[in-house]
Image: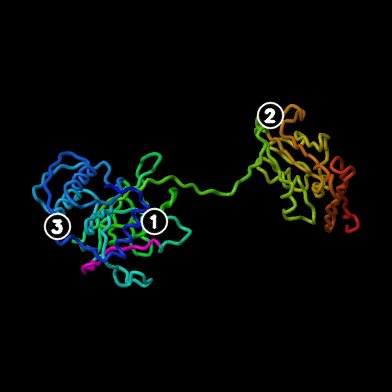
Amino acid sequence: MIFRPQSMMKNIICLLLLFSAGFAAAQSEEERISLEFSNAELTEVLLEIETKTSYRFYFLEGWLRDHKISGKYNQTPISEVLEDIFKETLINFVFLDDKIILTQNNVIYDHLPQGFFSEDKEPITTPEDSLKRGPIFYSANKTPAKTTISTVYIGRENIHNRSRFFTLRGRVINVETGEPVPDLAVLVRDREIGTVTNEQGYYELRLPAGQNILETRSMGNEDVIRRVIIYNDGQLDFALKEDYEYLDEIFLESDPDENVKTAVAGVERIDVKEIKNIPLVLGERDIMKVAATLPGISTSGEGAAGFNVRGGKTDQNLILLDDGVLYNPSHFFGLFSAINPFTTGSIDIYKGNIPAEHGGRLSSVFDIRSKDASTQSFSGEVSLGPVTSNIALEIPVIQEKAGLMVGGRSTYSDWIL
């Protein structure tokens, strides 16, 4: 008789373990059996045993699937037959009157070890501990309620094997490419045990018998947690997915068509906002003085109002203010500038390959543009210095449509002189 439902199977095992007074390792008078089979399914062999004896087996059919065996027995005790046919599987068995209960991996015991329900169990610390261990038990309640961890059973428990430590080997690969994952940390939670995979992705750990929580840690790969119930030496492989670190979005603003419309070489742009932060001489911010600090541009000399671009003469430079020619950009031998820095929006200096719309000059073109007035709110800037003062006012005329900018510059050096 084959019993398949898994939930009822668990209930039967619990009832048999806790309430049965007739639980025993084997019947006092064990039956003997003679049978022969070749390359037969395990389930078929168990059915044949049931027909020839008074025993009935209880197990899950999936445990024995794809297992084929051969054997010949003549008046052999049933326990020896079962030990032989299950030796290459993960199946253990226990007798209960005329019932034989099969278990996968673990062994059913008729008692619980001392302190099993206590939280303060004595931990296993050293692999050199050669004392014989007791039955292997584990409690799934040790895992936090919000954490779901899959359980993996390694090996088959053998009551005659009292080793306290077993070797777990395995390989870690990328699930998409199949390539090995090197330098991945394999750690055991709450124990000072861990290792790192080699270049081929292989690892090896020596674990205490029973429950161990394994964790994998690596940059660029997902972290995996497994509850490993180890009864013997075995293998556990991991197939990991790539894990990406998600960052906040970054916005890049640019004009993609600017270089497509025109590609001009030898052009310099002065940041007008930075002009306000340069050191001042007598309180005067002079755009032309800033331009003279650029490569290829130099002043004509002390007390001269002009400047030279790449060796050209002062009259070979064109200065445009909103497309209007500015003949004298400075006064009083270059001491006072004629350009109000508070009303200036941008300055482009062409030192070569001058566009045709700017007219003809041999050395350079200074294309100065005034900034647009604010159409939302009234604002202004004022600069007071020892010999000069500047003012710029932005006045909205039509909200969001039109605005007026008024700027002025004046010097009172004549009062001082």
Quadrant for the C terminus in the image: bottom right
Task: Determine the secondary structure under disc 3.
Answer: loop
Q: Give how far apart the Cα atoms at labels 1 and 3 are.
A: 46 Å
Q: Position of residue 25 (x, y in %)?
A: 20, 61
> Which amino acid type corresponds to the residue marked 3 in the rendered image?
Glu
Image-quadrant location for residue 65:
top left
Decide which of 385, 123 is in the foreground and name it.
Answer: 123
Query: Disc 1 on helix, strand or loop?
Result: strand
Q: Is residue 324 above or below residue 222?
A: above
Which class describes the residues within 10 Å of circle 2: few (<14), some (14-19), or many (20+)? few
In the rendered view, would you say 273 is above or below 194? above
Badge 2 amino acid: Lys
Instruction: Rate crowding at label 3 as few (under 14), some (14 to 19) or many (20 or more) other CA atoms within 10 Å.
Output: few
Q: Which residue is mark 2?
A: 261
Sequence order check, earlier mark of 1 and 3: 3
* Residue 234 relative to residue 332: left or right: left
| Residue 11 among magenta residues | no
Q: Position of residue 301 (x, y in %)?
A: 73, 45
Rendering coords of residue 342 (x, y %): 81, 48
On the image, the x and y values in percent for residue 189 come to 38, 61
Hey, what amino acid is under mark 1?
Glu
What residue would you read off at disc 3? 30
Span shown in magenta: 128-140
Outermost left residue: 74
Which residue sits at x=35%, y=64%? 191
Label 2 and label 3: CA atoms lie apart by: 98 Å
Q: Is residue 247 above or below residue 356?
A: below
Residue at which label 1 appears: 215
